[in-house]
């Protein structure tokens, strides 16, 4: 059997870093603390795993720290414990973890390396204490600075062998999409709603287009520019209060505090007598203090949705032609 000191040591190394991150997550996610802290901040998303790594190696045995593999990889264990706890307690959703976990693994490893270095210093307790308290000091400063809103563009295209009339009819109105037709792998993996259909009342400026997704997600679109069989631009509005709380995590909900889709555009370009290139691009906004990272995932997600729609339109247009 393990003696008491050994048991305490194991619990400290494995559970203390995870418990620290869990306390941070609960505190930074409290509505009453919105003026001071926030989950969608550098103070939480970047510092939490970094400090977890510091704690994990700081409380490890000196003999273990001689291995670089241990220093860099061991912090992933309390990180995995924290991930599991947030899922069980429903503090975070699967999609958020998929997007953030690669970043957390990297910063936890960096923290593990720093923790191993601090263990050799004379004033190591002071430095570790400062690190543990750092998010509580930087969080309010970051919230005071505010979150910049930036606009990004997601672009896709596909070549279709069909007449412009056939293609355009499928662009303006998309009939029911079966699950078998859906090939949007990234959104499916993240558990996001998939497209079902798109209805348009009139093919002209001012026309109302309703894009329907599963789980109650609806985009209300208004045509703002229209050239028949050439170009259609539409504004996009998603009303967060219409979306069931189980559809999207609050941190990625469309039209919420952090992410919104502004508009979309279809353009049809002739390449040869019977080949046309269908372009689809959209603009979306992000409002976080780490837009440089969030924008990468947001663009991948938007491009996956758009490419999925384009593939469906190509398959349907060419099947009508053949």
Image: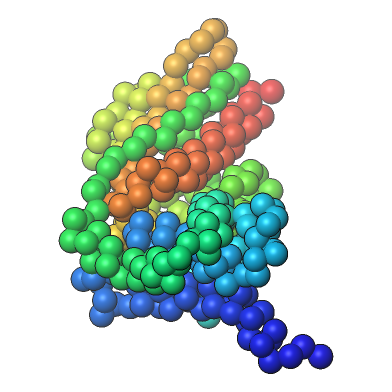
Q: Is residue 227 left or right of residue 125?
A: left
Query: Residue shown at 56%/14% (left/top)?
Result: 275
Looking at the picture, how far across and down is residue 191, in whole percent? 57, 59
Q: Quadrant of the N terminus?
A: bottom right
Q: Is residue 316 left or right of residue 165?
A: right
Looking at the picture, how far across and down is residue 152, in whole percent? 34, 37
Looking at the picture, how far across and down is residue 107, in whole percent? 50, 54
Looking at the picture, how far across and down is residue 281, in whole percent? 40, 32
Q: Quadrant of the C terminus?
A: top right
Q: Is residue 250 above or below residue 73?
A: below
Q: Is residue 306 visible?
A: no
Q: Is residue 13 above or below residue 73?
A: below
Q: Is residue 136 visible?
A: yes
Give the camera-side residue of 44 and 117: 117
Query: Residue shown at 48%/62% (left/top)?
Result: 121
Q: Residue furthest top?
A: 273
The image quarter containing residue 129 is bottom left
The image quarter containing residue 46 is bottom left
Q: Residue furthest right?
A: 1
What is the total number of numbered labels drawn onto the structure image? Answer: 0
Q: Is residue 274 above or below residue 76?
A: above
Query: Residue shown at 59%/47% (left/top)?
Result: 186
Give the camera-side residue of 188 and 173: 188
Give the camera-side residue of 302 and 30: 30
Give the camera-side residue of 94 and 200: 94
Q: Is residue 160 above or below residue 46?
A: above
Query: Residue shown at 59%/30% (left/top)?
Result: 314
């Amino acid at each position: 059997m393990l003696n008491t000191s050994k048991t305490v040591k194991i619990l400290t190394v494995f559970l203390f870093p995870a418990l620290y991150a869990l306390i941070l997550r609960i505190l930074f996610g409290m509505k009453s603390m919105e003026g001071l802290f926030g989950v969608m901040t550098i103070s939480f998303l970047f510092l939490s795993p970094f400090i977890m790594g510091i704690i994990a190696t700081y409380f490890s045995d000196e003999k273990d720290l001689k291995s670089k593999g241990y220093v860099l990889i061991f912090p992933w264990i309390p990180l995995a414990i924290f991930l599991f706890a947030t899922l069980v307690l429903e503090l975070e959703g699967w999609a958020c973890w998929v997007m953030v976990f690669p970043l957390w693994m990297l910063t936890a490893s960096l923290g593990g390396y720093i923790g191993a270095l601090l263990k050799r210093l004379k004033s190591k307790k002071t430095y570790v204490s400062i690190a543990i308290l750092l998010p509580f000091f930087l969080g309010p400063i970051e919230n005071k600075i505010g979150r910049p809103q930036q606009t990004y563009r997601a672009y896709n295209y596909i070549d279709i062998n069909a007449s412009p009339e056939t293609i355009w009819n499928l662009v303006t109105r998309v009939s029911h999409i079966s699950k078998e037709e859906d090939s949007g792998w990234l959104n499916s993996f993240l558990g996001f709603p998939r497209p079902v259909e798109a209805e348009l009342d009139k093919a002209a400026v001012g026309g109302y287009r309703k894009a329907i997704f599963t789980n109650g997600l609806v985009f209300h679109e208004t045509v703002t520019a229209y050239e028949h069989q050439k170009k259609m631009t539409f504004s996009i509005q998603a009303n967060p209060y219409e979306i069931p709380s189980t559809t999207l995590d609050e941190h990625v909900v469309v039209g919420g505090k952090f992410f919104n889709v502004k508009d979309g555009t279809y353009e049809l370009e002739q390449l040869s007598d019977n080949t046309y290139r269908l372009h689809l691009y959209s603009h979306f906004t992000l409002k976080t203090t780490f837009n440089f990272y969030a924008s990468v995932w947001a663009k991948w997600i938007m491009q996956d949705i758009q490419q999925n729609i384009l593939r469906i339109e190509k398959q349907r247009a060419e099947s009508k032609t053949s």
